[in-house]
Amino acid sequence: MRVNFVLSEVATGLRRNLTMTVAMVLTTAISLGLMGTGLLIAGMISDMKEIYYDKVQVSVFLADDVTDQQRSAIEQELAGSPEVAGYIYESKDEAYARFQQQFSQQPELVQNTPADALPESFRVELVNPERYEVIAAAFPNGQDGVDQVRDEGDFLDRLFSLLNGARNATIAVAVVQALAALLLISNTIQLAAFNRRNETSIMRLVGASRWYTQLPFILEAALAGLIGALLAIGGLVVTKLLFVDKTLAGPIRAGIIPPVDWGAIAFISPVIAAAGVGLAGIAAYVTLRLYVRL
Amino acid sequence: MIELQHVTKLYPASSRPALDDVSTEIDKGEFVFLIGSSGSGKSTLLRLLLKEDDPTRGTVVVNGKTLNTMSKWQVPKLRRTIGCVFQDFRLLRNRTVAQNVAFALEVINKPQRTIKRVVPEVLEMVGLEGKGNRLPGELSGGEQQRVAIARAFVNRPLVLLADEPTGNLDPETSEGIMLLLERINRTGTTVVMATHDYHIVDSMRRRVIELNGGALTRDQSRGVYGVGR
Ligand SMILES: Nc1ncnc2c1ncn2[C@@H]1O[C@H](COP(=O)(O)OP(=O)(O)OP(=O)(O)O)[C@@H](O)[C@H]1O
Ligand SMILES: [Mg+2]
């Protein structure tokens, strides 16, 4: 009955301020959803770094008219260089096969590209990825069978700074939303406490502790936070099913973008739920302490 | 049991003190009427005994505890040893009669078994058997006051404070309430009751403490309401 009592207080409170409760739940859900998205992007970035960064830092593209002699000279130089941690050779055929796979979603593009259009190359992993210039200097463009040396790291840096920007923007909006949610929670709790000040003062007269009278309000906020978190998690699941798995299916299969797997969502869900419940509960507690005399 | 030493209460809003250097002592098991014209400080005195407010000067002791030095978190404990009844009943509107009474036991962590047994007993004692499942709004004023008394008495408090408990009731209903308070007093509970009802005071002939403009002007055992009457 004691637990029942508190719970029925919570239910009454949430129903009494239904519109405020809905607003509270929605802002919390949006904020937590964005936070989850930010976390997923962050996870994706580190997955992508693993896919790209560790493998290729510099590509040495060979000219169309490269001779066998030139090719083996380049290979020898790479093999002997202390700057090079490893390299792989990619022939025209291999390059084309990889291209076909990457752009399998755009068959016209594949059809319109002749099989020998893509250059053969050495994909080089450096001991120190920052030392791109040394390799570039060793293989001047357009000489000795080398067409071009490209710093893939540079391209990746730009790609990742874009992704990092997206992540930061998402998290920034999430924080602003969280602030709005917290203010709304604080407001709702003040209103609820005001609405029930008679009941509360009666309970206090009978000897109920401060905790006992405050608990329903805190649980109320925490419950709203939990519902918001569940909505946010639902939103992430829907986003994965409808956007990531459908629209981004091609690049994911080609290995350009890592997939968002269920494990990642399962991993961040408890974080989101805890953030929702914790922040709402703490906001309510602080509000009651600072603004409400119960 | 209850002790006031030179208690003065000044409200910030007014220049005249609500209580002016009041000293008195009330022993265990006494029945005391607190009388005085409107604004003389009766409710203020009861509020100090409940530590709903603190005196500006002076010392208040209730049930052996000095309220002046008591910290906030100890207040609930104090109130669990004091029952209180008010003119406006102060029942939880959305709780049944039985739940209202049970609440006083729940806050002192009485086990469910005890609550299930004790609540109907007390309701029967105040004459509300069979009405435990009603909401306060479905009862008459007199019945609601009986619920309030049941709630105040259910955990056998050492002191019962009543602020004009019959203020909203007709004379016959008031008489019933007074019989109930007397009965509770006979169990050893100290009763302090603020009232304007001279019929009750005159017929019961108990100790009378009179306040006048916040000052204690009369303290008489087996007293009557008006001296000249
Ligand atoms: N919260 C308050 N703030 C300011 N002044 C107050 C407050 N409560 C009471 N007073 C003042 O203190 C004085 C005593 O009030 P109190 O309520 O104790 O009188 P009372 O004897 O209970 O009167 P009544 O018989 O009408 O209930 C009054 O002058 C009143 O205006
Ligand atoms: Mg009064």
Image (cartoon, coloured by chain):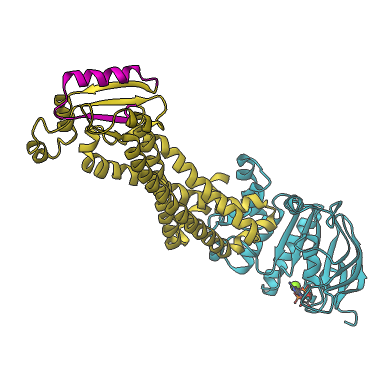
Chain colours: A yellow, B cyan
Is A137 contained in the magenta span? no
Farthest front residue in view: A143
Q: Looking at the image, is B192 positioned above or below residue A73?
A: below
The residue lying toward the viewer, choosing from B21 and A285, is A285
Q: How many marks?
A: 0
Farthest-out residue, bottom: B228
The answer to whether residue A77 is above or below residue A249 is above
Camera-nearest residue between B18 and A173: A173
Q: Position of residue B152 (x, y in %)?
A: 70, 56
- Depth check, front residue: A118 or B118: A118
Q: Is residue A265 visible?
A: no
Would you identify the image quadrant in which residue A67 lies? top left
* Residue A115 appears anywhere in the view: yes
User: On screen, A51 above or below B46?
Assistant: above
Image coordinates of residue B19 in percent, x first then y, are 85, 72
Lateral position of residue A235 relative to residue A188, left or right: left
Residue B187, x across and y down, in percent: 79, 52
- Residue drawn at x 23%, y 37% is A251
At x 16% / y 36%, what residue is drawn? A103
Q: Nearer the viewer, residue A31 or A23?
A: A31
Which quadrant of the rendered structure holds the N terminus of chain A? Answer: top right
**Residue A226: percent from the left, percent from the top?**
45, 46
Side of B88 where B138 appears, left or right: left
The part of the chain drawn in magenta is A55-82
Image quadrant in which the C terminus of chain A is located: bottom right
Residue B171: image quadrant is bottom right
Q: Is residue B60 left or right of residue A206?
A: right
